[in-house]
Amino acid sequence: MKRSPLARKTPLKRGTTRMRTTPKPGGNSDITPGVRALTLARDGYACVCCGVSVIGRRYSLGHRRRASQGGKPVPANLITLLGWGGEECHGRIDLYRDPDDAAKGYRVESWQDPALIPVMVFSPGGSGMTLFPTADGRWSPEPPEGAEAA
């Protein structure tokens, strides 16, 4: 049998692929299904940065304090974002493209408690509200004890 140098020696079984070409929506494996559902419902299945619905679009649950800096996969540390990796709102925040993202609470520093930092939550119309995430997966207009001034 003659084959080109790039052909596989052993064919793949029918119906299998070698790699996933698109990530699963919100593919953070450390986030439990319950926390994912709670966070998405709290955010109204929309990106907190722009207010656009994530239904049928690529999205992710972004850690406000990065996991590598001790950020936990809990509702107070997670926000729903359009895009994945380096694209759309998630990419802008993750790659530090907009310095205002920290002031809006989309990104917090390693020494900060995400539950004490308010988040600017936008609606599709462009208006936004500064809210505090709670441990039980809600938004609260009232700052918790020890929170920074909005």
Image (spheres, grey):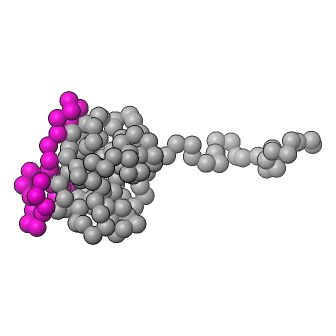
The residue depicted at 20 percent of the width and 36 percent of the height is: 123
Q: Nearer the viewer, residue 46 or 13?
A: 46
The residue depicted at 28 percent of the width and 59 percent of the height is: 108
- In this rendering, the answer to whether 137 lies above or below 81 is below
Magenta segment, which residues? 123-150
**Is 3 on the left or on the right of 114, as rendered?**
right
- In this rendering, the answer to whether 18 lies above or below 144 is above
How many numbered circles does the render carry? 0
**Is 83 on the left or on the right of 115, as rendered?**
right
Image-quadrant location for residue 7: top right
The quadrant in which the C terminus is found is: bottom left
- In this rendering, the answer to whether 137 lies above or below 112 is above
Q: Which x, y percent locates residue 20?
A: 57, 46
The residue depicted at 36 percent of the width and 68 percent of the height is: 69
Q: Which x, y percent locates residue 94?
A: 39, 52
The quadrant in which the N terminus is found is: top right
Q: Which x, y percent locates residue 66?
A: 36, 61
**Is 108 on the left or on the right of 85, as rendered?**
left
Image-quadrant location for residue 112: bottom left
The reply to whether the magenta stretch includes residue 136 is: yes
Q: Residue furthest front?
A: 99
